[in-house]
């Protein structure tokens, strides 16, 4: 009796998809959490069982044959369908419990969000937060994260969410360097030493201002983190633009001008449409929207009196 035809398992598809994407066995092994020898052995078993080669081995790496390309494409479709299914199931959960993956950047986390996360977890002890830091756009469709908290004026069209506030930016210097406050002649500030985000943040309007109006030799310190920028201003390296929710909370810093409306960016709470009604996601979005509305004067850089007034007022909710 002939042997029954080989049944390809989902794990086989995952392995072929990983090799096709990575073009090398070690990199593919890292993607799917196996060791190199296991990937090599399983690839040989799959090709032998199917009776065809799925990859050509070249010095530049593993290149799919027509059969391998077809299998990798099918694996991509299967992955998309399976992820969509699990995402839709997550959107139908009954109780607000389990893990919630939230992505944001380091400056928002450290200077603004951590106390809000702490308050949320006290209110919802059955929800666990997994916070992912980074400025790159994670794929919420593939459940890289459930919620994204981002400063952007152009949120992805495939996500839904709420604009919680508009982040104000202003120019700051070290207080001891400006004991009398900002100079009456603001043009003198152009002759000071400056710190700035580097060209990686060239889309930021504050960076564009520095590039256009400040002589390059005056920009003595560049870096790729807003937190580091605040530290540099506080250390007296130079003056620089900071988000108001960072600059106004550091007593050693002094504003050298009002927030500039043209430099502001929207603060968004974003999720995938399939997850919007999931109890844990909905609860988190409602809570964060309410708290950020309460803190809007601080985020937007309005005067201190307004911040105190907002802190004493009952929290409101925005949907």
Image (cartoon, helix red, strand yellow):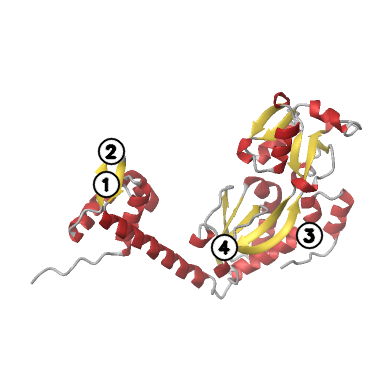
Q: Secondary structure at mark 3?
A: helix
Q: Mark 4 or 3 closer to N-term?
A: 4
Numbered badge on residue 59: 2
Rounded to the nearest angstrom, the CA distance separating label 2 from label 4 is 39 Å
Residue 260 visible to an observer of this rendering = yes
Q: Determine whether label 2 and label 4 are within 8 Å by CB.
A: no
Query: Badge 4 is on which residue?
Result: 158
Query: Badge 3 is on which residue?
Result: 294
Query: Up-down: is 98 above or below 31?
Result: below
How many other residues sit within 10 Å of disc 4, few (<14), some (14-19) or many (≥20)? few
Q: Identify the image quadrant of the N terminus.
A: bottom left
Residue 177 visible to an observer of this rendering = no
Residue depicted at 70% across the width and 35% down the height: 231
Q: Which tag is nearer the camera, tag 2 or tag 1?
A: 2
Q: Mark 3 or 2 closer to N-term?
A: 2
Q: Secondary structure at mark 2?
A: loop
Residue depicted at 36% across the width and 52% down the height: 18
Rounded to the nearest angstrom, the CA distance separating label 4 from label 3 is 28 Å
């Amino acid at each position: 009796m002939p042997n029954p035809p080989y049944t390809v398992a989902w794990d086989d598809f995952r392995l072929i998809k990983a090799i096709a994407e990575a073009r090398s066995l070690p990199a593919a092994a890292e993607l799917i959490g196996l060791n190199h020898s296991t990937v090599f052995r399983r690839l040989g078993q799959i090709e032998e069982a199917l009776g065809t080669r799925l990859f050509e081995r070249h010095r530049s790496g593993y290149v799919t044959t027509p059969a391998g390309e077809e299998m990798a494409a099918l694996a991509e479709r299967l992955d998309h369908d399976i992820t969509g299914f699990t995402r839709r199931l997550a959107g139908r959960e009954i109780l607000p419990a389990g893990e919630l993956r939230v992505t944001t950047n380091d400056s928002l986390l450290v200077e603004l969000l951590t106390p809000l996360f702490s308050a949320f977890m006290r209110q919802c002890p059955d929800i666990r937060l997994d916070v992912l830091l980074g400025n790159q756009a994670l794929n919420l469709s593939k459940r890289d994260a459930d919620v994204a908290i981002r400063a952007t004026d152009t949120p992805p069209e495939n996500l839904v969410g709420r604009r919680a506030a508009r982040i104000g930016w202003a120019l700051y210097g070290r207080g001891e360097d400006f004991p009398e406050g900002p100079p009456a002649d603001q043009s003198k500030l152009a002759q000071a030493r400056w710190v700035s985000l580097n060209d990686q943040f060239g889309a930021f309007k504050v960076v564009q201002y520095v590039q256009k109006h400040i002589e390059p030799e005056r920009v003595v310190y560049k870096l790729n983190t807003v937190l580091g920028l605040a530290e540099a201003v506080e250390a007296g390296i130079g003056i620089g633009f900071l988000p108001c929710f960072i600059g106004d909370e550091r007593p050693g810093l002094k504003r050298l001008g009002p927030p500039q409306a043209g430099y502001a960016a929207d603060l968004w709470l974003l999720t995938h449409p399939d997850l919007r009604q999931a109890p844990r996601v909905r609860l988190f979005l409602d809570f964060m929207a309410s708290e950020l509305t309460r803190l809007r004067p601080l985020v937007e850089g309005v005067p201190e009196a307004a911040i105190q007034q907002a802190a004493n007022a009952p929290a409101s909710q925005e949907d």
